[in-house]
Every structure is written in structure tokens, then in C-alpha cells.
Image (tube, rainbow, N blue to C red):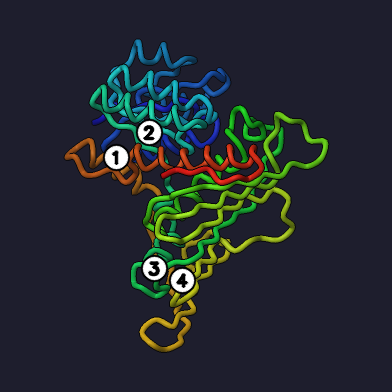
Amino acid sequence: MYKTAVIGFGGIGKWHAAMQRDTKAMEVVALCDINPDLQAWAAANFPNAHFYASPAAMFAHETLDLVSIATPHNVHAPLAVEALSHGVNVVVEKPMATRHEDACAMVEAARKHNRFVTVFHNRRLDPWFLAARKAIDAGLLGRLIEVNIAVNFGPGPNTWRGFTETIGGLQFDWGAHLVDYALHFVGDEVRAVAGFAWRSPGKPADQVDDHAVAHLYFKNGAVAHITSRGKAFTDPQRYHIVGDQGTLVDTWRWDDAGAVKVFTRANGFAAEVTVPYVKSPTQAYYDNIAAHLRDGTPLLVSGESAARVIRILCAAARSAANGSVPEPLL
């Protein structure tokens, strides 16, 4: 059994611990959080795991194969580098970091210590994402021209997610998933990024923006628009993807029984094609990590691919602060 731990389990970290356990190949031996009130939850749900109030104490007393980090975004990097320096493999919640240089430091630390760092881009297993990729890979859209992906997301100041310092910016939460979607749909390098951000008048400067857009310009000529909307009064389409042979649309629903719709002229005739969502449980993410530890199965999410997302988000933030002037990446 691989010995594992979680740092930060006041929220989604509980899910990470459960998924580690449910691989049947990992044993959760330590849970770490600065909130002492969580010790009761740890004792009730993982009675054989030791509780620690600091990562340093945990690393000093435990021999670990893997640690999952589910803390505020701005401390992902130092905690990951500390874990890697102790020879521990790392899963970090998305986004990987709030600065591109920190993401690169995490990748370099993994390389230096002959360990891996991977990021919980669990949305690569979303049924709607897999269905959209299936339609694109089948050629129903032809050559992609424009990719629109949006979500309604606007955290308030009642948690750390409402503050720029800890979250990184509005787009650094759901926007990380949306950028990752776009990169897989287009399958090409991003040559430039432009960003736009809007803040409600009078809103404190340390709180996140209320609306943010990142425009990704790809080397092959395609463009993607990634939008996080905190002030919208209607739900956006999840996907609206335009190709030279068809258009794909999908609305925001959360079950796995839906479908994406494609209006296509591929193969010389007009048709409306329904592509059912492709079921794939999130548990597959940790099952993949267990397989990687066991026999070297390639990771679902490489550190390098996650760092690419951070580079784009940071470029969008710089552009937004500079009048939306595009930031070159190539």
C-alpha cells in the first residue's frame, strides 16, 4: 500500500482523501490542516491517520509516497516544493499556482528529486468534455475557427476565494478548467493572449474582479474566448465551438445523461448530430496515479501541461492590467 496524506482538508481535501482510499492501493496515514477543529473529522473518518497542524511536522514524522495539496491557491507552490524536497510525489489542486514562475519551480523540483507533480484537472474526465472531444476528433466540426467556453462564477468575500492574493484572480478558479478545455479542443500552441477584467464600482481593490475574459490566439489561426461571469443573470452555454464544417453547443447541466449537439455539414450534407456524454468517473484520476506509482502508466495530467494553463492565465491578467493589449507567448 502506498502511504498518502492530504494537506488542507477543510473542503475539497476531504474528497481527495476519500479518492486516495478508494483506489484500494493507497493508505491515508496523515491529514494536515491549520484548523484544529478538523481533528475530530479526521479521527471519525480516517481513525488510523495521524493529524498534524503543520506540513513541516508531518514531513518530519511520516514516510510518504504521495501528498495531495488542497489549500488556498497562493500556497500550492511552496508546499509542493517542500514535499518534493522530502522525496514525496505531489497532487495539487487546480490551479497549479498563481504565478507561472512558481509552476515552473514545481516542475523543476519534481525533476530534481526524481518525483512527479500532477494537478487535479479532474475536468478532463467530464462527460461533456469527452463527448465534445469525440465530436471534434471525428471531424464533425472540421477545422476549428472559434471556441467559446463560459461559466457563471463569482465568489464573495466570505472565503479566501473572494480575494485576489489567495485565489490569483477570478479566472484562476473555474477559468483554469476552461482554459484546459480549450487547449485540448484546439490542440495547438497559443501564440498570444489578451485579457479583460471588470470590477464593480466601489468594490475593494483586494477582492477579485466580477467579470473576466481571456482571448487565446492559437498558432493555427483559431481563437478561444474564456469567460468567468460573476454578474450574469442567465446561464451561458458551456461550449459554443465553431468549425468550418460544423458548430457544437452544450449547456450547463451536471448529470452524465446529457449530450452535446453538433450542427454539421461534414461529408457533404447538413445534419444535426447528438453525441451522448461519455461517462468517466472522477475516481479514474486517482486510479491513474495509483497505476503510475505501480507500473509507470503515464499520468493523466502532467505538471508541464498544467503549467501551460498558468502561463496563459498570468498572461491574460497582465494584459487586462495593461489595457487588454495582447501578450505574446511564442
The 10 Å Cα crowd at callout 4, few under 14, some 14 to 19, many 20 or more, is some
> Residues at badges 4 and 2 in contact (C-beta under 8 Å)?
no
Amino acid identity at mark 1? Ile
Amino acid identity at mark 4? Gly
Left or right position of 318 against 133: right
Circle 4 sits on which residue? 243
Amino acid identity at mark 2? Val
- Residue 326, position as x, y percentages in the image: 56, 46
CA separation, marks 1 and 3? 27 Å
Q: Secondary structure at mark 3?
A: helix
Task: Give the number of the mark in front: 4 or 2.
Answer: 4
Circle 1 sits on which residue? 289
Amino acid identity at mark 3? Ile
Q: Residue at x 69, y 48 (%)?
A: 230
The 10 Å Cα crowd at callout 1, few under 14, some 14 to 19, many 20 or more, is many
Task: Give the number of the mark in front: 4 or 1.
Answer: 4
Which one is earlier in the sequence, the residue at label 4 or at label 2? 2
Left or right position of 196 against 246: right
CA separation, marks 4 and 2? 35 Å
Task: Give the number of the mark in front: 4 or 3.
Answer: 4
CA separation, marks 3 and 2? 30 Å
> Residues at badges 2 and 1 in contact (C-beta under 8 Å)?
yes
Circle 3 sits on which residue? 136
CA separation, marks 4 and 3? 9 Å
The 10 Å Cα crowd at callout 3, few under 14, some 14 to 19, many 20 or more, is many
Which one is earlier in the sequence, the residue at label 3 or at label 2? 2
Circle 2 sits on which residue? 91
| Front-most of residues 178 and 161 | 178
Q: Secondary structure at mark 4?
A: strand
Q: Secondary structure at mark 2?
A: strand
